[in-house]
Image (cartoon, grey):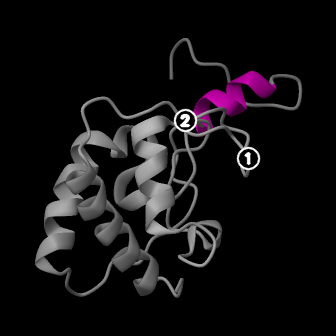
Amino acid sequence: MWGVSRPTEQNPEAAEAILEGVAIVEVKLPKTLSENAQIGKRIFEAKCASCHGENAAGHEGVAPPLVHKIYEPSHHSDTAFLLAAKNGVRAHHWRFGNMPPVPGVTDGEVNLVTRYVRELQRANGIH
């Protein structure tokens, strides 16, 4: 491509620029989603996917995947998702920086998004 440096050991910034935005994990989709998870998916796509990626697979250099063992229910409860969306959260597992609050998100919307993420997690062996 014109004007784009090729990634090399001498040019790590070019390698990072190419990787930024690439999905961090591969997400297997469930055969079906519950009705609430389908609604949650639409909300996720509108309010979360720009950072957390399509199907919550993360974006390299932007935000972590939510379909990851770190976010299993026994480690990050549904309430943790609600608090993160409403208040933001300090970086503590990843090196993406702090997550800001999601403007205008309601508790009900976060609950539906959480339902969607949990169904994705189960389809990927995260319980």
Give the labeled residue for mark 2: 99
Q: Give the residues drawn in magenta, as a range.
A: 12-19
Q: Is residue 123 above or below residue 97?
A: below
Q: Earlier in the sequence, mark 2 or mark 1?
A: 1
Q: Secondary structure at mark 1?
A: loop
From where the camera sits, is residue 4 visible? yes
Q: Is residue 26 above or below residue 92?
A: below
Q: Is residue 98 above or below residue 2?
A: below
Q: Residue furthest top?
A: 3
For residue 95, what is the image quadrant? Answer: top right
Q: Residue furthest right?
A: 10
Q: Residues within 10 Å of mark 2 (few under 14, many from 20)?
A: some
Query: Amino acid under label 2?
Result: Met
CB under 8 Å between callouts 2 and 1?
Answer: no
Q: Residues within 10 Å of mark 1 (few under 14, many from 20)?
A: few
The residue shown at (51%, 58%) is 80
